[in-house]
Amino acid sequence: MKLKIRLCYKVVLITLLFISGLIIVAIIFPALDVLCTPSYAKHQRDALKMAWLKWFGVIVGLRVSKEGEALNRPCLLVSNHISWLDIIVLGRFTPAHFVAKSDILAWPVVGYLAKQGGTIFVRRGDKQQAKATAEQMVWQLKQNSTVIAFPEGTTTKGDGVLPFHAFLFQSALLTKANIQPVALEYMGVAKGHAPFIGEDTFVPHLIKILSLDKIEVRVAFLAEINTAGKNRHFVSNEARAMILDSVTGEKDKNQATAIPKLKRQL
């Protein structure tokens, strides 16, 4: 009985949060663009997005254990990908534009909020659209915005790190932006419930998350990657190796041969 009451309470709160999100993106964002200077409007939009994501975290009972610090300047932030919750976790630390799969556009309410909130969408398997995604990332980095991407291209159970899609790193090389890897790891009961994989759909998974008492997650902001003299494949392998080591303690065997390969390419 107590669990049902808690779930109903959270469902009401998350519904109100979604309604507030619709008001923010449909009314307040356009008003800011009309009434304020571009820089001030951007600052206010970023503040509202972060506040909304923080409240989302409060409602689902997010408990974050943070290691390291996020860069205090615009950068390309790359992370392993386990769940849609990753966006809620990372969005509380820095204002950013997320790179997400286009499937999210079909999600009720969330798809609209993501689009209006400045998410950059990528369609898996579409090389032409991938090029457009890279161009959007370059544009945002040139505008001194942080971009957060999940280079695995899909979600996993979190017990490993899939190979990265290197094209997502090209924008940082072209704009000379900093790259910071981030490792995510859900803990406790959430370790088995947070992964959004296989045939999972958003609403049933959201209900499952809301039924939990808390969501424990470890967030490790890793060392900044120096991109000087490197290509996108090298920095992609370097970022993956750092995240893999943080999540599993394993070393990436491919990274050991990356330097000789890079020298031959250069």
Image (cartoon, rainbow, N blue to C red):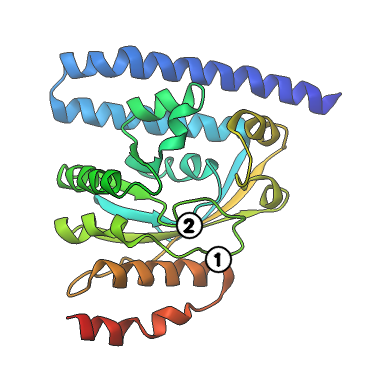
Q: How many marks?
A: 2
Depth check, mark 2 against mark 1: the one in front is 2
Residue 70 visible in the shown view: no
Q: Which mark is residue 180?
A: none
Q: Is residue 37 left or right of residue 167?
A: left
- State whether residue 260 appears in this view: yes
At x 48% / y 57%, what residue is drawn? 80
Measured as percent of width and height from the top left, residue 12 is found at 63, 17
Q: CA distance from mark 2 to mark 1?
A: 9 Å
Residue 156 occupies quadrant? bottom right
Q: Is residue 202 left or right of residue 240?
A: right
Find disc 2 in the rendering and name its residue.
Answer: 80
Q: Are marks 2 and 1 in contact (CB under 8 Å)?
A: yes
Tell me which label, 2 or 1, sits earlier in the chain. 2
Check residue 247 in the rendering and tell me which mark sits there, or answer none. 1
Give the side of residue 59 with respect to residue 46, left or right.
right
Q: Position of residue 120 (x, y in %)?
A: 32, 39
Identify which amino acid the numbered label 1 is placed on: Val
- The answer to which quarter of the image holds residue 166 is bottom left
Determine the residue located farthest toward the left in the rendered image.
37
Where residue 177 appears, as percent x and y from the top left, is 20, 57
Picture quarter with the N terminus: top right
